[in-house]
Image (cartoon, helix red, strand yellow):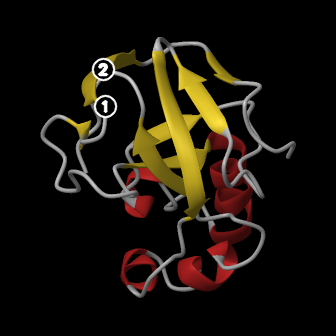
Amino acid sequence: MDATPRASAVAGRGLVGNADQGGKRQVTIISREIWDDLRAELGPRVAPAMRRANLLVSGMALADTRGRVLRVGGVRLRVYGETRPCEQMDRAVPGLRRAMESGWRGGVFGEVLDDGEIAVGDAVRWEEDGPAA
């Protein structure tokens, strides 16, 4: 995964240049706070890029948010579920998969609802049209 300061989102497709286009897994999102916890547990080698997620957000609890809509800048993203960690996590850092298995610590996946740009530093907030977390 290569970090980038901005990405173009296409409604119903995902992020331009991303392998996952269409379907319900158009974008994956992880929490900075969870990754800070994982680093404390497993050591400084645990970097967000190891999760191979599209977005790293701060200040947003992602657990149990299925059906909610997250706004990142001007782009809305509907959360469809928990991103389950796979065996690739242990190839990156032994024990990482197990550390992410509970409490939605692997992040969430969802679909892009709006065309637009997402950039580092964009405001992130929950929209009101979804079940409470």
Q: Can residue 23 be seen by looking at this rendering?
A: yes
Q: Is residue 76 left or right of residue 129?
A: left
Judged from this view, the residue extending furthest toward the right is 132
Residue 109 vs residue 121, the one in the foreground: 109
What is the secondary structure assignment of the residue under circle 2? loop
Q: Amino acid at mark 2?
A: Asp
Do labels 2 and 1 touch, CB within 8 Å? yes
Would you identify the image quadrant in which residue 114 lies?
top left
The residues bearing labels 2 and 1 have C-alpha atoms spaced at a distance of 5 Å
Q: Amino acid at mark 1?
A: Ala
Q: Earlier in the sequence, mark 2 or mark 1?
A: 1
Residue 76 lies, with reference to residue 111, above or below; the image says above
Residue 81 lies, with reference to residue 9, above or below; the image says below
Position in image of residue 98 (x %, y %): 64, 85
Q: Residue at x 67, y 64 (%)?
A: 105
Position in image of residue 131 (x %, y %): 81, 44
Assess disc 2: are there few (<14), some (14-19) or many (≥20) residues with their C-alpha within 10 Å of its C-alpha: some
Q: Is residue 17 left or right of residue 47?
A: left
Q: How many marks?
A: 2
What is the secondary structure assignment of the residue under circle 1? loop
Question: Which residue has dot 2 on it?
Answer: 115
Question: Which residue has dot 1 on it?
Answer: 11
Assess disc 1: are there few (<14), some (14-19) or many (≥20) residues with their C-alpha within 10 Å of its C-alpha: some
Q: Residue at x 62, y 35 (%)?
A: 69
Q: Is residue 89 left or right of residue 96?
A: left
Judged from this view, the residue extending furthest toward the left is 17
